[in-house]
Amino acid sequence: MYQYNEQDQNLINARVEQYRDQTRRFLAGEIPDEEFRALRLMNGLYIQRHAPMLRIAVPYGLMNSVQIRKLADITRKFDKNYAHFTTRTNIQLNWPKLEQVPDILAELAEVQMHSIQTSGNCLRNTTTDHFAGIIPDEVEDPRPWCEIIRQWTTLHPEFAYLPRKFKIAVAGSTEDRAATQVHDIGLHLVQNDAGETGFEVLVGGGLGRTPVIGKVIRSFLPKHDLLTYLEAILRVYNLNGRRDNKYKARIKILVNALGTEEFTRLVETEWDIIRATETRLTDEHIARIKGFFEPQPYAADAVDGLAVLENQLADNQEFSAWYERNTRDHKVAGYRAVVVSLKPHLKAPGDITDVQLDAVADLADKYNFGEIRSTHDQNLVLAHVAAGDLYQLWQSLRDQNLARPNIGTLTDMIVCPGFDFCSLANAHTLTVSEQINQKFDDLDYLHDIGDIKLNISGCINACAHHHVAHIGILGVDKNGEDFYQITLGGSSREDASLGKIIGRAVPQADVANTIEKVLQVYIDNRTDDERFIETVRRIGVAPFKERVYAPVN
Amino acid sequence: MPLLINRVVTEDSWLLVDEDNLSTHLNEDIVVPYELFAAEQEQLLSAEGGLGIRINGDQDLNLVLQNLDKLSLVTIEFPAFTDGRGFSFARILRRSGYSGQIRAEGDVTRDRLEYMERCGFDAFAIPADRFDETMVNAFGEVSVHYQGCADDERPIFRQ
């Protein structure tokens, strides 16, 4: 992974001291609330329902064991012994003290971490595929490009006060695990007819109040032009995006208002002026950054573990169930990628304790070259585990309650913190995810239902991406009571689509029962190997609606 | 209103005029609001004194760009500190070859000075109640720059 040099380190150290001084001046009354709000948000600090919340950046979801141990330590010293992983692959601390944040940042800087631009109306953390670099059919590893973008976005002087937040995601293969089509900018690594690598560029996707799928504005951007093109898009947005209404300020609204063609024309006109400037990438820089993402030193004899593994799988059904759901192919024979489930029974999805963090760091050192990844679905990935180590790893993860075999199933939900923590939320989410967990605890049933994506957002801001879930649940407030609106048929993958509302919102007590009815319609209608989303697309929403709202006898 | 030019507190030598007193001061060093400039272009461009224009993010920068060689001052207004359009205005002015003064005015306070300077501003009119002499320390708080900008077009990989 990328290692800071002296300049990178100097930059974050200076940023810590700058923020320390900003905090000091705020506490001394020298900075008005509203102005400090913008400054602290740009450094990841929210004021929430109970306490401030600090969001720490995990650039493109990649960490090492030293960083994970530091995070564990920070949750002990400054918080309540746990942290929360988000859909931007970042980490949130729910109970830090505002006055202590500069000290937390100083500790993070020791392990090359920070919270720069994890919130606010600026360029946010760039995300990517959590299986980057290990997929057989990848055009190219997207992470070097994410690092190039990370550097360009960090403390960008011109784009720090955008109309609204701005998120970029990069995908390196035809499978899209980074929800690139619902980002402000989605970048797809592609090859042209000449065999050159470049990017397909999508703009104006997004969720929130106005969910939109991004539009392709350029089918092939030569790789050296990546940053100049991003600069052109951002300048057009910074100058033309709406600033009179925060709900109309995202780039998706601008793209829709101008039309894709006109928006593209503005970008290309600007790009013509700047494409040959110093910002154009050099071969040397690309090669230097790629050098940090070389393949791990895989053992040639890892394939020997396959025979052992086969016996272990045959002997242990529990292990076998975990292997089926929570591991996947690696391009190097004898290795597999392991998803560490942060979706245990009756615990907040995405949460992890200090003890679990330390354990994951140790396991990463022992079995995974010290590397840990966080995913868009709020889980962790150990991407390079030798076949012969899987059984021991599974046992250790199980001891830590990190091996629930539910990846990609109904209980692998994306859930925002909801009303319990968030000051924007209209409704609780954690109670609903608990209810669903209680109702659908039977493993055979879950595995029979198979691949399904269920997401729960506590308000219309859609932090849990309910619009692009196969089953989306949106919490709404009706005269002080929590109700839940259900959508079906969404996807954030390469076949991206927005879910359709099936009818009036249901009361909190009825959510799991409603989901059960929806699943029953699927079971009654599915053909052979048809996945839930495929059945919904084939038969439409009507049969589901009919069952859910059928009069009770 | 305290004025910083090139990081030094300086007396303002420019006079802001409106349509009522324009004729009195036509041949002095004057700053003209955008609408007045648009209306009185011919007269202003042939006057003897220095000429400045005051513009905000809602107005058309092209009018300024078309007259760059006649202008010695461009004042960019920030109606709110969150309005980032001025940063791009300054950047575009500098890349178009403009070397006169670019002044930030309005909601201009310490924690944006460094970014503004990088984008090409060299003058800052700061509300008196938000001014103090230690503000100049804001420049260069973070000396490592990943991106090229108006102060140095080279990004870190070309430095």
Image (cartoon, rainbow, N blue to C red):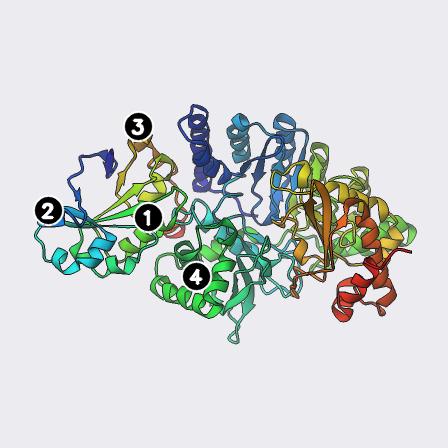
Q: Nearer the viewer, residue A21 or B2?
A: B2
Identity, as a three-letter code, of the amino acid under mark 3: Asp
The residue lying furthest to the bottom in this view is A193
Dot 1 alpha-carbon crowd within 10 angstroms: few under 14, some 14 to 19, many 20 or more: many
Q: Position of residue A235 (x, y in %)?
A: 40, 56
Q: Where is residue A129 in the image (x, y as percent from the top left)?
A: 63, 56
Residue matched to label 4: A229
Q: Nearer the viewer, residue A263 or A398?
A: A263
Q: Earlier in the sequence, mark 2 or mark 3?
A: 2
Identity, as a three-letter code, of the amino acid under mark 4: Tyr
Q: Give the CA distance from mark 2 to mark 4.
A: 45 Å
Residue A330 against residue A398 in the figure, above or below: below
The residue at 53%/43% (across/down) is A118
Residue B119, numbered label: 1
Residue matched to label 2: B25
Single out the mark in the foreground, 2 or 3: 2
Residue B132, numbered label: 3
Residue A161 against residue A285 in the figure, above or below: above
Evaluate whether label 3 is on the same chain as label 1: yes
Identity, as a three-letter code, of the amino acid under mark 1: Cys
Q: Which of B48 and A270 is in front in this view?
A: B48
Q: Which chain carries label 1?
A: B
